[in-house]
Amino acid sequence: MTTSTKETLSHLDWLESEAIHILREVAGQCSNPVLLFSGGKDSLCILRLAEKAFRPGRFPFPLMHIDTGHNYKEVIDFRDQRAAELGERLIVRSVEDSMKRGTVVLKSPDEPRNKHQSVTLLEAIEEHGFDCCIGGARRDEEKARAKERIMSFRDEFGQWDPKNQRPELWNLYNARSHKGENIRAFPISNWTEMDVWQYIEREKLALPSIYFAHQRDIVMRSGAIVPVNVPLASGDVINAPKPGEEVINMQVRFRTVGDITCTAPVPSDADDISKIVLETATTTITERGATRLDDQTSDASMEQRKKEGYF
Amino acid sequence: MDAMNKPHNDSLLRFMTCGSVDDGKSTLIGRLLFDTKTILADTLTHIERTSKKRGMEAVDLSLLTDGLQAEREQGITIDVAYRYFSTGTRKYIIADAPGHEQYTRNMVTAASTANLAIILIDARKGVLTQTRRHSYLAHLVRIPHIVVAVNKMDLANYDQAVFDKIRADYLAFAEQIGLQREGHDIQFIPMSALNGDMIVDRGDAMPWYTGPTMLETLEAAPPAHSEHDEPFRLPVQFVCRPHASDDPELHDYRGFMGRIEAGEIAVGDAVTALPSGQSSRVKTIELGNVQMQRAITEQSVTLLLEDEIDISRGDMLVKTGQAPEPVKQIEAMVCWLSETPLSTARTYIVRHTTRESKAKVSEISYRVDVNTTEHLPAQGLNMNDIAKVTFKLAQPLMVDPYKVSRPTGAFILIDESTNNTVGAGMIEA
């Protein structure tokens, strides 16, 4: 065996290169893909990867956001601004439209809308005839995701069947689907939260302001920090404190952004990316554990939602 | 800050673990994650709760790799799971595959992306049938580095004689299947995943062992593509022609996009496009909006050529003079992945690099007993079977022998009616 040590890629370059390869495979194999873009940090990384994969050409897919109507205004504004800067087409489909159509029925007006995104997503897939949705999910996020394929097959009901997944070997991805079926492609499957922040730092990516430490009115509710009196892009204000709850003004940041009703901030004084990288390296709580109010119900809650067509 | 937790990494290693829960595989992975501080407090609290609920006294680190609901119900691991951890110097991707015979296909899947395999042996049981199976598969899929982890040394009184005997037995078996002869590097580590001996910390129990710990071994393992010179191979994924652009400079832009699967390329190098055989020189190498003088293996780049030649997705760029012959027949070792048996009457799709061809079986030479490596006659193939198969191809493929180049020697078989991936192949000739 030779002992020569040829130059190889750094871990971040390797992850970047793998993700670019996956995006180009989607473009090469699928006839009508779409990139799911929320304005969150993972999907912002994917936008940068798509630039590296396809520029100076245009992206071979539009961007799409499934809006619950309960997203932070800062993130929605950032989403629109970023799509405009890139000159790429942004499709927005709203859970509230599904509610008007009667395809989403909330159990109560304040029920979190996160899981209902699946319905709106499936409706949008059907409307546009998309055969592949590119998403920012990572295998390190949650244990149901640890076994997810990079190209994940969904049947015509959008269902993920963990017992019936296509084997995925080498970097030979199989993104074939019949009409009505769908592939979910996850270019940053192999990234961890730390990799994402290191990439954001290296690429100097701009982020919505709520990722950085800021002052915010919150209440403590069953041990979680719950933001209250949050203004929406629509002008409405949601999450009024419940009677008897004490509103505290706290310095916080979001590790993950999503529907307001199920995403909690963490106390932090990290006001720039390098401080966030440092904080991520020394944190003692997982990203979802700290910040997702919807995954704590049972061991299998993410798995269940994925089976029902979630990203 | 803890030295293990520095947000700084230089390289990446993908490895797999072979063994069953009984060998302490999940405990080993749990231990690696735990001792490198990858496990965070809330996850630990969670598994503490689960351990108690299941009536265990100590925290069961194997719960860290607990998988899907269906698997928990059956108490087994069905599918390959991917785990991540990072040290000060390296990022690791673990492919955690179930070890049982009926999951051969999952082991092959996990092995396909690994550059190192940890083969677990229970110190009390020694080299078993499953050890042979795991080693044969690691050999078949050409994982260059094999680490034989002799686990549960705590239950064998940390006795050096036990370790030495297992090492001798394994080496005798390795000689039989030609592991070292064919370039695999084999190392042995005595350990106790349960107590953490020789995983990240050495512990005090085995002063007679002076070799590296598991983590030291992982830290020192060469990354993929670092040990041999390989011929340049760039399968074209996508052609960028932004002619609708307002920028007149882009009017003639033709970028050939793909990942360098092997070798290196520099501006000015003579290249040939396959299968057409037309040649040109590299004018520009781009990654995003950065121009580079050269690019190395595993980099996703865009190449612009001096001359206008017709190249599309599925073609391959190679250095002129290093071109593989396009072939219309391949002999390969195939692992059958599907519950539906292989039919010699049917046509399948071979996907090789970014290229596809229809394919028909012309011969099944033999099937391999993965436990004894014995060759057996075979008419068809069932799930988990491994066999030598010859295919006739409708379109030429530009292939290398798998043992020379894994990325350009590998292919998958797709069933056209279901679109399922039904087979994995490694080209011999």
Image (cartoon, rainbow, N blue to C red):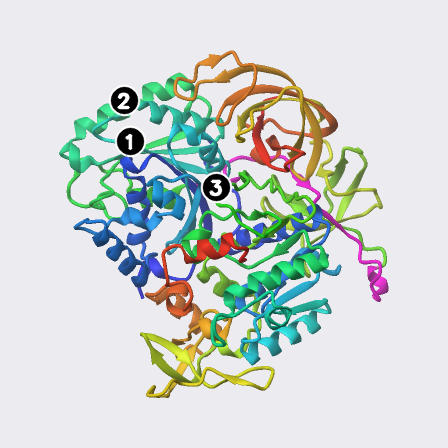
Read off the chain for label 1.
Answer: B
> Closer to the camera, A209 or A222?
A222
> Closer to the camera, B110 or A156?
A156
What is the C-alpha distance between the residues marked 1 and 3? 29 Å
Q: Which residue is mark 3?
A: A163
Residue B250 seen: yes
Task: Quarter of the image for the N terminus of chain B: give it.
Answer: bottom left
Q: Residue B85 vs residue B333: left or right?
A: left
Most prominent secondary structure in the magenta stretch? loop
- Secondary structure at numbered mark 3: loop
Q: Amino acid at mark 2?
A: Ala
- Secondary structure at numbered mark 1: strand
- Secondary structure at numbered mark 2: helix
Above or below: residue B404 compared with residue A280: above
Q: Which residue is mark 1?
A: B121
Q: Amino acid at mark 1?
A: Ile
Q: Residue B63 vs residue A1: left or right?
A: left
Marks 1 and 3 on same chain: no
Q: Which residues are magenta?
A: B222-250
Read off the chain for label 2.
Answer: B
**Residue at x 20% of width, y 45% of height:** B195
Above or below: residue B217 compared with residue A159: above
Please give the label number shown on residue B168: 2
Read off the chain for label 3.
Answer: A
